[in-house]
Every structure is written in structure tokens, then in C-alpha cells.
Image: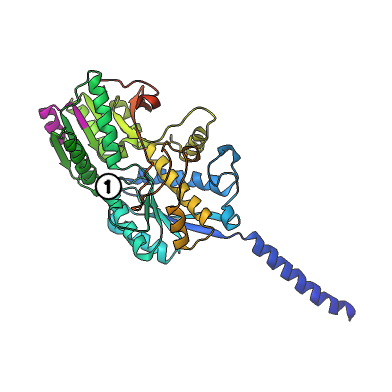
Amino acid sequence: MRLSKLVGPLAAAAIAMGLASGAMAQQKTVKIGAVFPLSGNAASAGVHAKAAIEVALDIINNAHPEFGNFPLAKNAGLAGLGGAKVEVVFADNQGSPATGQNQALRLITEEKVVALTGAYQSGITLTASAIAEKYGIPFVNGESVASNLTERGFKWFFRTTPIATDFAQVYYDFFTEMKASGAKTDNIAVVHDTTEYGVSVANTLAATFKEKGHPIAQDVAYTTNATDVQSQVLQLKDKKPDVVIMISYTSDAILFAKTMQALDYKPPMLLADDSGYSDPSFIKAAGKISQGVFNRSSWSVGPAGSPTAIIAKLYKEKSGDEMDDTAARQMQAFFVLADAIDRAGSTEPAKIQAALKATDLKPEQLMIGYKGVKFDDKGQNILASGLIIQLQDGENYVAVFPKANAEKPPVMPYKGW
């Protein structure tokens, strides 16, 4: 009788202790939504973005003291939230602004994410971030460069990447230096698609160069996901510009490279506005016939054993490809967002928003070559910066401008194949 009376309370206590220990074991999870093109013509970029964020998740959720001053690396999880782990819910925008908008809505209303990142193409970032703005959810973008994204008066949109106006200045400075060394850079043609990204960047370049007394001589537009660009290449071949600036997503960039080879057209200088020309799929498909193409970037692997070299190794193990500039910029944005949530010590959107506004990261705290991360009142990172790289010696880009960051000197003229 006494034993039965004793067993009841002991069993209850044991159950209670088990439930308590189980509750302690179940750490709080912070859910972030990521909208990227995981299918369609830009799927390669989306898949690489997913790999970049998954590498960042490993660094955030597990202790990585080898990354030194990187926020969130030393501890496992978010210290500001008691070691909470970060979970990412990925959504496929299919390369469609409408689908991106719907996926952002689903992530907010059904998945209950506390913040969003994405969406690669500027036109999709435009619609997806509008949903986040409506619902008062922070949206941190790391790769879309259309200038108007931070000109909408939004309070919940933050962008870490350099934008078209920044790179227009870099291009101008690069052409000025190349001209001083004997290259012809006066006659410039801009080739772009008709998406938000293509039109916005082309307009920004035209305005910047006109302001500097160096107007763009030729504007060549085409419909994105084109099946035939012979007429555009023939226009270039006829006008013979000194420089051709390409603003194209991956499938179009590959098509232009192959069409240029088929029509035996090589401009003296070919400069890409990142995007498709940074995609590992482009390097594999058209790198050998695009030797000497210049590109813009903010990413550099760095010396062996450096934090960036370690990240590059982790990324290659995850994706099977070398880290490219776009994936690196996406990863950096995700780190900035997670850091803000950690500093907020909360998953309340308004507190995350306040932490983002207070962000002031230094170069040694970044995995990319910005001067830092600090947002203006429009949500644009005022310390974002970039450089010029060139595809040399096979399938590797090397930094060539400015001289302070150059690994090798620029090689002219454009070799092609």
C-alpha cells in the first residue's frame, strides 16, 4: 500500500522532469523566408543562392571560431535569443514577379517567417518586397541592383549590395584608366534585356555617362529569355563600338557568347554587369569562348586560410562550384539579417527593423569586400563597393581594377575564343 502510494508521485515527478528536459532540449527556432528562382531560366542562380544561404546557416547555427570577428560565428545559434537556431524556408519564384509576390505572401501568412530575403531578379524583388512592406516584415536584399528599389519610400526594405549608380562610377573610372593606358573607350554600346534590372541599369549608365560628358553611343535592347540575338549582334558588328557593356541573365549571356562566336564578332572590350556572366553555369557553357571578358564583383577568395578562403571551400563542398559574386552578395545579406535578429534579441518585426537601422558592420566583420554595412534612411548600404574582374587563363576571374585590389593587370583586347 505504501509502495503504491509512493510510485504515483514518483512517476508524476519523473514525467514532469522528462517534459521539462524535453522542453529545454527543444530550442526556439527563428524562421526566415528566402524567395529565389529555383526553377526556370534563372534556376542556376537560385540554386547557388540556396547553397550560399545553407553554408551561412551552418556558420550561424554551429560554433565556428575560425571566422574571427564575423558576427554569429563564435557561438552556436543566436546568443541574443538564447542560442536559438535559424531555419530558412525556401520558396521558388519561378522567375515570375507575380509568383514571387505570391510566395512572399505565403511565407508571411502561412509559414509565419519573421523576415525575408531574395529575390535575385530586381523585378521580382520589387513585387515580393512590396508584400513585405504591406505586412510590416523586414526584407533584406543582397543582389538586386535596380536603383529604384530603394527609392520607393519603404521602411522595411534594406539592401546591402552596391547598386547601378555605384558600378556606373566604377565603370567610368575603369574606362578612364584604360584610356590613359592607350585603349579606346569613347564609343560605348549598352546591351540589355527589357526586365526591371536591364532597363534600370541601362538608364542609370546612360544618365551617369551623359552627366560626365560621355554619352552612351548605342542602346541595344532585347526581350529576356531570347531564342535568337543575331540582329542585336549584327547591330554591334555594324556600329563597331569600342566597348560593349552586357546586362544579361544567364541563358541570354550564354546565347550572346555563342552568337558572337558564330558571327565572328569580337568587340575590343566586353564588360559584363555581373548577373549571368558570374553564374557558374555561364562559365561552364561559354567561359572558353568568352576569354578576356571584364565583369564587376565585390567577392574575392583571399589568401589561403583566410575566412573568405574557408567560406569558399565550404561553399564548393556544398554546391560543387566555385563561389561567384552573386552568391557571395546573397550570403552577406543573410549574415546581416541574422546579425540584426540576434542584436534585436527578439523576433518582433519592429525590433528587427530597428536593429537593421542601427547596423554598423566593419570590413573585418564581412565575408565580402565592402567598406562596411551601414544603411541610409532609404535602406541602402552606403558602404557597399566593388571592383572589376576579368576572365583570364581558362575559367577563373581575377581582380584587375582598381590597382590596389588587382591580382593581375587587365589584358586587352577581348580574346573571345
Identity of the residue drawn at 15% across and 38% down:
220
The colour mode here is: rainbow
Residue 253, image x, y percentages? 26, 37
User: Which quadrant is home to the C terminus?
Assistant: top left
Q: How many marks?
A: 1
Would you call the spot at circle 1 few (<14 residues within 10 Å), some (14-19), or many (20 or more)? many
User: Viewer-proximal residue, 12 or 67?
Assistant: 67
Foreground pick, 211 / 252: 211
> From the image, which quarter does the N terminus lie in?
bottom right
Residue, disc 1? 147
Query: Taking 289 as reference, is 235 left or right?
Result: left
Residue 416 makes an appearance in the image:
no
> Among all residues in the image, which is located at the extreme top?
182
Of all residues, the one furthest to the bottom in this rendering is 1
Q: Nearer the viewer, residue 125 or 203?
A: 203
x and y, in percent, of residue 393 in the image: 36, 21
Secondary structure found at label 1 = helix
Give the residue at the far right of this rendering. Answer: 2
Q: Is residue 88 magenta?
A: no
In the rendered structure, which amino acid carries the disc numbered 1? Answer: Ser
Report the side of 226 relative to 38 (left or right). Answer: left
Whether residue 163 can be seen here: yes
Q: Which residues are magenta?
A: 232-244
**Viewer-closest of 20 and 227:** 20
Q: Position of residue 286 (x, y in %)?
A: 30, 31
Residue 417 vertical position relative to residue 106 in the rendered view, above or below: above
In the rendered image, the vertical position of residue 296 relative to residue 161, given as above or below? above
**Mainly helix, strand or loop, the magenta region?**
helix
Q: Is residue 134 above or below residue 74?
A: below
Q: Is residue 70 left or right of residue 195?
A: right
Q: Position of residue 234 (x, y in %)?
A: 12, 31
